Image (tube, rainbow, N blue to C red):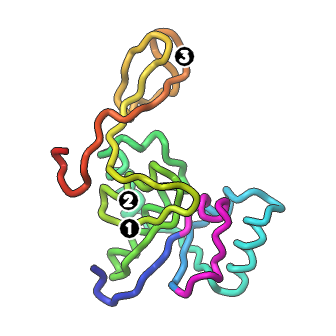
Amino acid sequence: MSTNGKRAVILDTSAFVAGFDPFSICEEQYTVPAVKEEIARKSISEFRFETAEENGKIKIEKPEGEFVEKARRTASDVGDTFFLSDADVQVLALAFQLKANGYSPLIATDDYSIQNVAKQAKIEFASLATFGIRRRLQWMRYCPACHKTYSANFKSSSCDICGTLLKRKPLRQTNADNPKG
């Protein structure tokens, strides 16, 4: 729990795409510069974002390097590194940073990889347009053509045997409170 009791909502790009209105809640709201770059130009999402930014409703902060590294390590632990954009990593890093500064962070996102990493790190998240994940997922990557399997963090996006684009599927599901399943 936070030491000062302050709730901080960290907004991912998917929150804006899902139609989240920053004026609908009173908690402090944050996002990262990369989210602003991901929002489609001349869209209602961009309009909401810019209006909230201009009115001081959203604070845009770039997370410190140590928290970016912590987010990457945690993503690697659950096999989501390959599926997170730079913006996703920054959103997670900002949640780690705010938590370290005594806030109680909540990430508003429909991105399953962000949710999976957040669950691993015991950071709350809220889905807006999807049901969200219920259990933490361990991923594996595989070739749908020749069926060769790879670790979730395999660097290439294609099979080293036949060149087919790799897919991913859950290796196993684990309960977040019980690492053994």
Q: Residue at x 37, y 63 (%)?
A: 66
Which numbered disc, 1 or 3, marks the residue closer to the eye?
1
Q: Are marks 1 and 2 in contact (CB under 8 Å)?
A: yes
Q: Say above or below: 48 vs 6.
A: above
SS at circle 3 = loop
| Marks 1 and 2, how far apart at CA | 7 Å
Task: Tell me which segment is drawn in magenta.
Answer: 11-26
Tell me residue 113's x, y (percent).
45, 49
Which residue occupies the extreme front position in the image? Answer: 131
Mark 1 = which residue? 124
Give the quadrant of the C terminus.
top left
Answer with mark 3 or mark 2, whichever residue precedes in sequence.
Answer: 2
What mark, if any, has residue 164 been given in the picture?
A: 3
| Marks 3 and 2, how far apart at CA | 31 Å
SS at circle 2 = helix
Answer with mark 1 or mark 3, whichever residue precedes in sequence.
Answer: 1
Mark 2 = which residue? 118
| Marks 1 and 3, how far apart at CA | 36 Å
Q: Residue at x 37, y 78 (%)?
A: 104
